[in-house]
């Protein structure tokens, strides 16, 4: 209907806003929302956009940023640390799933190239959905969580040859060349490109970003990131390979530098918007007519994807000596097609490797498998318990028995939830104070190491009632949560309060962002890392410059007694303004200069309704003198600096009042 790119984008954004907002309320992944938008506006829907060439151009940039972001997340150190999971379980899953899907396609009469594309796409799972859901459920360090992460890491690795494979298949199909010769030539070229880019990353990119960072220019840094991502994609495309390969390799190279987190924050605005457009174009390829005509076939293929992938992953996990419960939960978490799968299918459309009708049916089924995956991941424990009730219960009974065996000798003890660096430090203080404790942790490797060394630490989810009972909750005198995972902490606190409304709960958190929520959930004390490190740094400083220890101790006690409220106020910088959504609930400090024309000049603080605006006057600076907590009858003069504190929106209203008399 509309060929103008601006009109197309406005239409997309308008419908996307409504659809994504609705999906957020229904707790659906945003990816699926964008696909629905594509179905609505595309040529097979209401045909608001019949010619998607302009949008496809932007979507190509979306694919580039998707692969660049995945490359950034790829960690060589994590791959080495989890090498058994990655190269054992991960490789077995990908190749076994690919072979099974290829065999099914061959039985269905699909040609070889089409079959290879489908097998490659269906062997991969959704990193974005699985990692996000497992993290929110605090299962990322569990046995099935680590197995899932290991498989996903190998899928990221195998993506490199798969991205080389698609153009190779297109060459053999169009030119009729020998498949083996073309494959060997293209992979040799691919290996050369990878080696060149890794060499560039090692010897050029790190010095380049060091110089760019030294310039302290946010704009220059962002431009350099965009240049590296897009030039890498352009280079691989010019070499006859997929542009997504270059983007992925660029992300991998930069992911190993110290600038990784800064790069992630810089590209996120571009990535999220353009990535959304990519999934919109995926939705544009889905025909509602074909879906309705072949509804039962699409549904059957969707169920087939979930069952085949689930059974293959379960079988592989069991053959590699995973327990039945862990194998089932890993299989349920990964039994879907992922973003990489959609990328491969859309690339196959670009290279004419998939018939449109067949590809449309398969693409729709892949999207539906993604739609149900958040629920499968969310309820993986309950489903696994139904499937393997006896072995699941036996496994949990064994875990609870081991914990109970330790806790039965304890009384009036401390329960440590989490045995990472902070938990281990706390345990040493408890041991030195001759206090009994028992620790629960979800990292099986850490638990094995610590328990072998004689530490009273056990594998167990502290948000489970049975685990807490086994840890002797009824006899414990306090619970301390030593990790800074907000979602996990909330789950544990709520479970504890259901079981024991009176037991003291001490919680660690990274900063003050979730302090009120944790206290409202039932925590007695919340210790933010940021504030505690500030207090310790300041107290060491005061001691080193000769302040009396008694005075320093008094100051630190006062800070803690007031629940860090004095430290909550801060002067926002440029970075804080960029993070407005996450900072909006924080109290900021702001200095207002009173010019000669300011409304507040020659008025007392009492004359100004600042309290009604929920703003506090912390100080008045006059010349070189700063007066803390000024009295209500203080008269304001020209060129006074009024230091006020409050929420950002309240501070803005108060500044307007001081200058104009209107709020």
Image: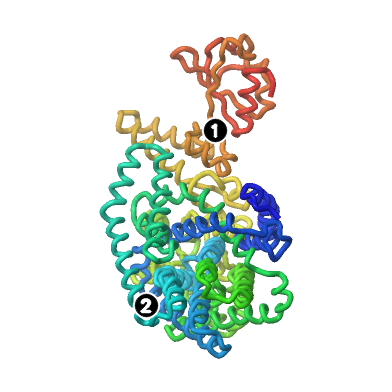
Left-right relation of 510 to 463: left
Residue 598 seen by the camera: yes
Element assignment for label 1: strand
Q: Position of residue 612 (x, y in %)?
A: 69, 26
Q: Is residue 632 above or below residue 572?
A: above
Q: Is residue 444 above or below residue 110?
A: above
Callout 2 crowding tier (Cα within 10 Å): few <14, some 14–19, many ≥20: some
Residue 285, located in which quarter of the rendered image?
bottom right
- Work out which residue is located at the far front of the displayed protein and give it: 175
Residue appearing at x 34%, y 33% in the figure: 541
Q: State the mark number for residue 588.
A: 1
**How far is disc 1 from disc 2 in space, using C-alphas?**
63 Å
Q: Position of residue 495 (x, y in %)?
A: 61, 62
Residue where numbered disc 2 is placed = 182
Q: Quadrant of the C terminus?
A: top right
Residue toward you, 115 or 312 = 115
Callout 1 crowding tier (Cα within 10 Å): few <14, some 14–19, many ≥20: many
In this rendering, the label closer to the viewer, 1 or 2: 2
Q: Position of residue 202 (x, y in %)?
A: 28, 56
Residue 475, located in which quarter of the rendered image?
bottom right
Decide which of tag 1 and tag 2 comes sooner along the chain.
2
């Amino acid at each position: 209907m509309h060929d103008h790119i601006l009109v197309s984008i406005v239409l997309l954004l308008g419908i996307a806003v409504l659809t994504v907002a609705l999906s957020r309320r229904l707790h659906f992944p945003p990816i699926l929302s964008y696909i629905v938008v594509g179905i609505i506006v595309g040529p097979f829907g209401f045909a608001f956009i019949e010619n998607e060439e302009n949008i496809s151009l932007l979507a190509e940039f979306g694919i580039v940023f998707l692969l660049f972001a995945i490359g950034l997340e790829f960690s060589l150190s994590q791959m080495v640390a989890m090498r058994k999971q990655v190269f054992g379980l991960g490789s077995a899953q990908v190749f076994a799933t690919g072979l099974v899907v290829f065999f099914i396609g061959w039985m269905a009469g699909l040609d070889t190239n089409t079959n290879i594309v489908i097998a490659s796409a269906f062997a991969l799972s959704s990193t974005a959905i699985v990692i996000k859901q497992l993290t929110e459920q605090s299962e990322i360090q569990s046995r099935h969580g680590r197995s899932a992460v290991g498989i996903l890491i190998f899928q990221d690795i195998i993506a490199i040859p798969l991205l080389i494979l698609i153009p190779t298949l297109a060459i053999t199909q169009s030119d009729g060349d020998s498949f083996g010769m073309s494959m060997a030539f293209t992979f040799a070229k691919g290996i050369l490109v990878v080696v060149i880019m890794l060499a560039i990353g090692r010897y050029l990119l790190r010095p380049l970003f060091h110089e760019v960072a030294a310039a302290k220019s946010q704009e220059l840094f962002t431009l350099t990131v965009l240049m590296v991502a897009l030039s890498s994609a352009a280079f691989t495309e010019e070499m006859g390979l997929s542009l997504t390969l270059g983007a992925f390799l660029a992300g991998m190279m930069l992911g190993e530098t110290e600038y990784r987190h800064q790069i992630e924050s810089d590209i996120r605005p571009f990535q999220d918007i353009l990535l959304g457009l990519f999934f919109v174009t995926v939705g544009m390829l889905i025909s509602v007519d074909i879906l309705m005509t072949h509804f039962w076939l699409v549904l059957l293929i969707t169920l087939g994807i979930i069952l085949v992938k689930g059974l293959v992953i379960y079988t592989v996990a069991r053959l590699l000596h995973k327990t039945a419960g862990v194998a089932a939960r890993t299989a349920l978490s990964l039994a879907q097609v992922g973003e990489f799968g959609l990328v491969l299918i859309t690339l196959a459309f670009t290279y004419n490797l998939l018939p449109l009708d067949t590809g449309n049916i398969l693409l729709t089924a892949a999207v539906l498998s993604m739609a149900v995956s958040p629920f499968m991941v969310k309820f993986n424990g309950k489903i696994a318990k139904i499937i393997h009730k006896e072995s699941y219960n036996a496994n949990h009974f064994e875990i609870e028995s081991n914990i109970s065996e330790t806790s039965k000798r304890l009384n009036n003890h401390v329960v440590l939830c989490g045995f990472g660096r902070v938990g281990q430090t706390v345990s040493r203080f408890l041991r030195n104070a001759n206090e009994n404790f028992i620790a629960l942790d979800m990292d099986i490797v850490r638990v094995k190491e610590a328990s072998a060394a004689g530490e009273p630490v056990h594998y167990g989810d502290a948000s489970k009632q049975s685990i807490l009972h086994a840890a002797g909750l009824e006899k414990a005198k306090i619970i301390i949560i030593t990790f800074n995972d907000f979602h996990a902490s909330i789950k544990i606190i709520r479970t504890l309060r259901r079981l024991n409304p009176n037991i003291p709960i001490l919680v660690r958190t990274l900063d003050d962002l979730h302090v009120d929520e944790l206290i409202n959930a039932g925590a007695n004390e919340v210790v933010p890392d940021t504030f505690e490190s500030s207090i310790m740094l300041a107290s060491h400083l005061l001691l080193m410059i000769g302040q009396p220890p008694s005075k320093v101790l008094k100051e630190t006690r006062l800070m803690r007694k007031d629940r860090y409220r004095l430290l909550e106020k801060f002067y926002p910088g440029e970075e804080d303004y960029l993070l407005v959504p996450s900072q909006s609930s924080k109290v900021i400090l702001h200095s207002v200069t009173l010019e000669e024309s300011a409304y507040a000049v020659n008025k007392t603080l009492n004359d100004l309704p600042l309290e009604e605006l929920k703003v506090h006057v912390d100080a008045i600076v006059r010349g070189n003198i700063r007066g803390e907590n000024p009295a209500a009858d203080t008269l304001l003069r020209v060129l006074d600096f009024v230091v006020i504190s409050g929420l950002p929106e309240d501070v803005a209203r108060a500044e307007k009042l001081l200058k104009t008399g209107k709020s």
